[in-house]
Image (spheres, grey):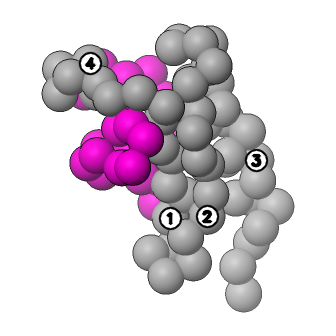
């Protein structure tokens, strides 16, 4: 059984990216197949900037490539 309460709390923590980059979250959702939270920004970041941002998240994150609107990150739960 999926612990959605934990997922929602983690998503709230991830939203702190707005404090770093401003209002730039395009999509933040749980992907049940990957058992991960996916974040897509509204803009594309250079690889160096994406690496620095990964270190700013309050939960462990990985760069997940380029999405339809911007840079993507993944958080495994």
Q: Establish if 1 lies above or below 46.
A: below
Q: Establish if 48 lies above or below 27.
A: above
Q: Which of the image's four quarters has the C terminus? A: bottom right
Q: Establish if 11 lies above or below 5.
A: above
Residue farthest along the front direction in this orientation = 68
Looking at the rendered structure, the secondary structure element under dot 2 is strand
Going from N to C along the chain, the mark reached first, 4 or 3, is: 3
Q: Are discs 2 and 1 less than 8 Å apart at CB?
A: yes
Q: Are discs 1 and 4 less than 8 Å apart at CB?
A: no
> Label for residue 36?
1
Residue farthest along the bottom direction in this orientation = 1
> Label for residue 9?
3
**Distance of mark 2 from mark 1, alpha carbons?**
6 Å
Going from N to C along the chain, the mark reached first, 1 or 4, is: 1
Q: Which residues are magenta?
A: 51-77
Looking at the rendered structure, the secondary structure element under dot 3 is helix
Residue farthest along the left direction in this orientation = 47
Q: Is 73 inside the magenta-drawn segment?
A: yes
**Distance of mark 3 from mark 1, alpha carbons?**
13 Å
User: Pointer 4: what residue?
Assistant: 49
**Distance of mark 1 from mark 4, alpha carbons?**
22 Å
Going from N to C along the chain, the mark reached first, 4 or 2, is: 2
User: Pointer 2: what residue?
Assistant: 30
């Amino acid at each position: 059984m999926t612990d959605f309460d934990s997922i929602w709390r983690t998503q709230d923590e991830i939203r702190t990216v707005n404090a770093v980059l401003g209002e730039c979250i395009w999509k933040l959702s749980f992907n049940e197949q990957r058992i991960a939270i996916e974040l897509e920004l509204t803009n594309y970041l250079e690889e160096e900037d994406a690496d620095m941002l990964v270190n700013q998240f309050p939960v462990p994150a990985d760069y997940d490539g380029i999405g339809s609107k911007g840079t993507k990150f993944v958080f495994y739960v």
